[in-house]
Each structure stands twice: as structure tokens, then as C-alpha cells.
Image: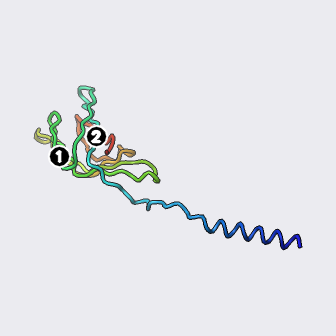
Amino acid sequence: MRRLLVAALLLSGVARANDVKAPDISPPDTWQARQRGTLRIMNKIASTVASITLNVGETVPFQSLQITLSGCFVRPPDLPADATAHVAIVDSRQDQPGFNGWILKNEPGLNMLEHPVYDVQLAACS
């Protein structure tokens, strides 16, 4: 009798556990679009750092650079925090490198802008 009672209690617990819905989790490749991006730009010669905020689709000048933000995205709150932006950077001085690609906030070293004067990093998307 005691075994039957224990088995009934265990089975009732299993039934209740099956009624609990697992949390919704975003797929790992999910990104949410934002309308603005903030870039941190370091002038390595002058040892200065500035932040600029752009709207998606906007081009702004910064010293000899023209910077265009064409997209800014963040991870959903249920995934590890990160942000990414697609930027195009053109230097008005001849023979200076430009950049057209993605920048990850948490991996600034993956940015392939190899500029002798400027480092550009993504600070945030909002």
C-alpha cells in the first residue's frame, strides 16, 4: 500500500511538471534592429577620443572621415548582450584606407579598419 501511495505521488508530480511551459528562448542568431548607433573614435596621433551618434542611414563627418551607419542591431534580452553595426568609412585624404563592413561591440578587434590615425569602435545601438 505504501509503495502504491509513493508511486501515485510521484506520478502526480510528473504530471504537474509536464504542465510547466519551458521559457521561450530566441535562436542564437537573432538580432533586433535599432534606429541609432553610437561610435567611439580614437585619434591615435592626437590621443583624443570622441563619441558620435548617428541615425541609421545617416552620414556624418568626423575630422577627415565620412562615416555612414547603414544598420545597427542588438541581441534580444534572453541572449548574451552584444551589438553590431554596419558602417562605411571614407577618408577624404588620398591613399588612406577606408572600411565598409560590420563592427561588433564585444569584439572590437575584429574590425578590419586598418587606419594609421583612427580606431573606430561600436559603443551602443539604441
Picture residue at 31% right of the left edge, 40% below the top: 121
Query: Residue 58, labelled with which disc?
Result: 1
Q: Residues within 10 Å of mark 1 (few under 14, many from 20)?
A: few
Marks 2/1 in contact by CB < 8 Å: the verdict is no
In this picture, is 71 found above or below 2?
above
In which quarter of the view is residue 62 placed?
top left
Q: Is residue 106 left or right of residue 62?
A: right
Q: Earlier in the sequence, mark 2 or mark 1?
A: 2
**Image color mode:** rainbow
* Nearer-the-camera pick, 80 or 116: 80
Tell me the kind of residue under disc 1: Glu
In this picture, is 98 found above or below 12?
above
Query: Residue 72, labelled with which disc?
Result: none
In which quarter of the view is residue 13 placed?
bottom right
Residue 64 in percent (x, y) is at 14, 36
The residue singled out by tag 2 in the image is 38
Residue 49 in percent (x, y) is at 28, 30
Residue 92 in percent (x, y) is at 11, 40
Looking at the image, can residue 73 be seen? yes
Q: Residues within 10 Å of mark 2 (few under 14, many from 20)?
A: some
Q: Is residue 57 left or right of residue 124?
A: left
In this picture, is 11 found above or below 47?
below
